C-alpha cells in the first residue's frame, strides 16, 4: 500500500528521510498552473526544489472561477485548461489528477441538479480521452455536504464515472468526507470496481491520523474486502509537517496492517 501526503514540494523537501512517505500529492493550480503561458511555466518549473519522494498526484484541479456547472460554463476554456494541465502533469511525473474542485462545480440556488449532472458528465466524456493521451487518470472526489452541494456521495460519484465510461475517469473515496456525512464503509464495497484513489484525515480539526485516535479500521476492512491496491493520501491540516508526518504514516500503517494490508 503506497501512502502519500498532500503538501507542496517546498514543504516536502523538509521531510525527514525516515518519514515513510511514498509520494507527494501537490496542488495542481500552484504546482503546474495551467493558466501560465508556456515560457513562464518553464521558468517556474526549473526552479521547483527536488523532493525526497516523487510527486505522483495533484488535487485542486479547477480554479473556482472556471465553472463546470451552471449557466456560465465555457467548454472551450475548460478544454484548453485541461489540455495544458495534463501535458504539464505528464511532464512532472504526475499520474493522478484529483477532481474535487468544489468551487468550480458548486450549484447556485435553483439551478437544476439534473442539468448539472449532464454538464459534468459531458465534461468527463471529453476529459477521458484527453487524459488517456498523457497517461493521466482523473479521479472524481465526492465532497461532504458542508463544503459543496453537488456530488456528495460515492454513489453520485460512481454515477458520473459510469456515465463517462472511460478507463481514465475513476472514483476517489475521501474517508474524511464520507465520515462527515455518515457514509457507510459498505459504500466502498459497492463501488469498489471504480475506485482508484483514497484520501484520509481525522474528523476533528481535519487532523492527520494518530492525532486524536480516530478509528478507520471499519473502512480499511471494507477496502481489504475489495482487494483495493491503490494509493492512500493523507489530506489534512498539517501544523508541523516534518514532525507530524512520520507519526501519521506510522499510525495509518498500523491500522491498515490490523485489517490485513
Image (cartoon, rainbow, N blue to C red):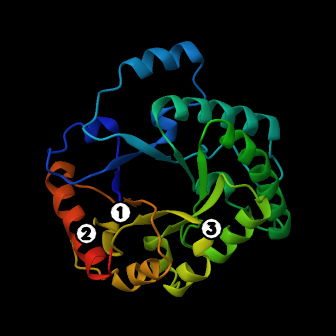
Residue 187 point in image, percent of width and height: 56, 82
Left or right: 203 with respect to 222? left
Please say if 79 is above or below 123.
above
In the rendered structure, which disc, 1 or 3, sits on the residue that comes first in sequence? 1
Label 3: which residue? 194
3 or 2: tag closer to the N-terminus: 3
Question: Circle 2: is it few (<14), some (14-19), or many (20+) Cα within 10 Å?
Answer: some
Name the quadrant containing residue 146: bottom right
Examine the image and state in which quarter residue 236 appears: bottom left
Residue at 84% in and 52% down: 71
The residue that disc 2 covers is: 253
- The residue positioned 39% from the left and 78% from the top of the image is 220
Residue 153 can be seen, yes or no: no
Q: Which residue is mark 1?
A: 1
State the image coordinates of residue 153 (x, y, percent, origin top left): 61, 75
Contact (Cβ within 8 Å) of mark 2 with mark 1: yes
Amino acid at each position: 500500500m503506497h501512502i502519500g501526503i498532500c503538501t507542496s514540494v517546498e514543504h516536502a523537501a523538509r521531510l525527514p528521510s525516515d518519514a515513510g512517505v511514498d509520494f507527494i500529492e501537490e496542488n495542481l493550480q500552484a504546482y503546474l498552473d495551467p493558466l501560465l503561458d508556456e515560457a513562464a511555466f518553464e521558468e517556474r518549473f526549473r526552479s521547483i526544489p527536488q523532493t525526497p519522494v516523487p510527486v505522483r498526484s495533484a488535487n485542486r484541479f479547477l480554479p473556482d472561477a472556471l465553472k463546470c456547472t451552471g449557466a456560465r460554463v465555457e467548454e472551450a476554456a475548460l478544454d484548453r485548461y485541461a489540455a495544458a494541465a495534463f501535458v504539464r502533469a505528464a511532464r512532472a511525473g504526475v499520474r493522478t489528477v484529483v477532481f474535487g474542485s468544489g468551487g468550480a462545480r458548486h450549484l447556485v440556488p435553483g439551478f437544476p441538479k439534473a442539468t448539472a449532472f449532464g454538464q459534468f458528465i459531458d465534461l468527463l466524456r471529453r476529459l477521458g480521452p484527453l487524459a488517456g493521451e498523457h497517461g493521466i487518470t482523473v479521479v472524481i472526489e465526492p465532497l461532504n455536504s458542508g463544503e459543496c452541494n453537488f456530488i456528495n456521495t460515492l454513489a453520485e460519484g460512481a454515477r458520473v464515472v459510469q456515465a463517462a465510461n472511460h478507463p481514465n475517469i475513476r472514483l476517489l473515496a475521501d474517508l474524511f468526507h464520507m465520515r462527515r456525512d455518515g457514509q457507510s464503509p459498505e459504500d466502498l464495497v459497492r463501488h469498489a470496481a471504480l475506485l482508484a484513489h483514497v484520501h484520509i484525515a481525522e474528523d476533528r480539526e481535519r487532523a492527520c491520523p494518530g492525532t486524536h485516535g480516530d478509528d478507520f479500521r471499519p473502512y480499511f476492512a471494507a477496502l481489504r474486502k475489495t482487494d483495493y491496491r491503490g494509493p492512500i493520501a493523507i489530506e489534512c491540516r498539517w501544523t508541523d509537517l516534518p514532525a507530524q508526518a512520520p507519526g501519521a504514516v506510522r499510525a495509518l500503517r498500523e491500522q491498515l496492517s490490523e485489517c490485513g494490508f
